[in-house]
Amino acid sequence: MADLTCIRDGSPISRGRRASLTLRLAVPAILAQLSSILMQYIDASMVGRLGADGAASVGLMSSSLWLFWGLCSAVTTGFAVQAAHRLGASSSGEARDVVRQGITACLVFSAAVTLVGLAIASRLPHWLGGDEAICGDASMYFAIFVGALPMLTMNYLAGGMLRSAGNMKVPSLLNVGMCLMDVVFNWFLIFPTREIDFLGMHFISPGAGLGVPGAALGTVAAEVVTATLMLWYLTCRQEDLRLRHRPRRSFRPTRAVLRRAVSISAPMTLEHAVFCGAQVMLTVIVAPLGVVAIAANAFAVTAESLCYMPGFGIGEAATTLVGQSYGAGRRELVKGFCHMTVWLGIAVMTAMGAVLYVASPLMMDIMTPVAAIRDIGVEVLRIEAFAEPLYAASIVAYGAFVGVGDTLVPAVMNFGSIWAVRIPLAAVMAPTMGLRGVWIAMAVELSLRGAIFLWRMYSGAWLRKARIAPPVNPVPPDEPTF
């Protein structure tokens, strides 16, 4: 766990110390993100063994699930950022109040989203243009995940709160454990009882044989266990945030905390809704290309995630470091952490892009035995590899901007880019170039988006547009305050 008291107490922090803090927060966050996407990779590879229809039923619903997951995740960010600011200002009592109120508000919001999801689950695959043969499994897969949204939201909230306190270790370890549980649960829920040959030994492996719904149930079970442990650690063990303090305080959200949460989360929530709406539109564009294209697109998206999830891990570290520095009123430290984390993200994802280009055949081999799906998947992954460096800039810079509460303009930049560039290009190129055209459009848009975020970072506009005034906190005379 990184010690961030040097930020809060106003101690001078050298460039080397900044780099050390950045790495100590970023590495566990990267591992947590990789374990999360590895879980999706495992799901995809296991479902891929069921054939093209099973893979397509999962792929058809992926973008819609991202929409529902992202809405809940964005809401939790509004509370986690406030906690980081309070901790940066050494106001742990107020930070605990944010934790309590965040639990209540996020549970209410996620329950409402769950009801909406369950109401449309049976019709959604048909709206997306799915073939009748896959709509039944697709609907069940979606409904199971949506039904578990309240617990998944608590996982997001508890993880965000722990990271706001500089604790990247516990969320990382619990996410690794979730990945391992997912493998075990999926093994017994997806496949039927069967005979296994291993190192010359023969044994019977019991199984429920639930297929695609089994993949959803296995992942949800792992998420529920992880969310329970994450909440327990946050409320009972985490220094400065645990709730075992007297006097007992109310879990009822106050107007001030809700207003600040909305000011941070509302642009992110709207952005994610519009962004995932674009992903759903891309699904509609891909669906007429056939079951093979749908499956290849879904598997390629999962494979590519292994490259960009490190960027999201570094972005989480940027949010914590920038948020606490901002709460402490240390402007130059805010800028220094922002620039350092962004260039670290670019370096890491450039290397990951090279790995993606070389290893794409192996990655697709793991996920599906269908040659036609593998071949298309490899081709589009190699197209996307060239966009990874600038994609990193947009991911990490966004995390830094969130740390100071600047979410509106970056949200507009994100969804404006995808709707103005990616969707029109994909719609034009898909009929003649197939799935390749869709991924060329994606690579062009991601590169443009990254360039825009770099421009905004160096312009300094993200600091001038910060939506929450930082608490007053003494700092050394050589570091100007906001």
Image: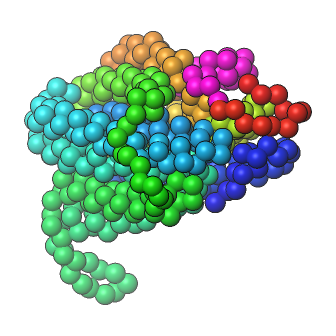
Residue 472 figure quarter: top right
Q: Position of residue 346 (x, y in %)?
A: 67, 37
Which residue extends farthest right?
478
Quadrant the N terminus occupies: bottom right
* Nearer to us in this view, 117 or 394: 117
In the image, 279: left or right of 472? left
Q: Position of residue 450 (x, y in %)?
A: 61, 25
Is 456 in the magenta? yes
Q: Residue at x 70, y 56 (%)?
A: 3
In the image, 191: left or right of 329? left
Residue 403 figure quarter: top right
Residue 104 figure quarter: top left
Q: Residue at x 33, y 49 (%)?
A: 152
Q: Position of residue 341 (x, y in %)?
A: 69, 39
* Nearer to us in this view, 243 or 335: 243
Magenta part, dominant SS: helix
Q: Residue at x 21, y 64 (%)?
A: 189
Quadrant the C terminus occupies: top right
| Residue 240 versus residue 52 in the image, above or below | below
Query: Do we see residue 85 in this rendering?
Result: yes
Is 2 in the magenta? no
Residue numbers of the magenta segment: 446-470
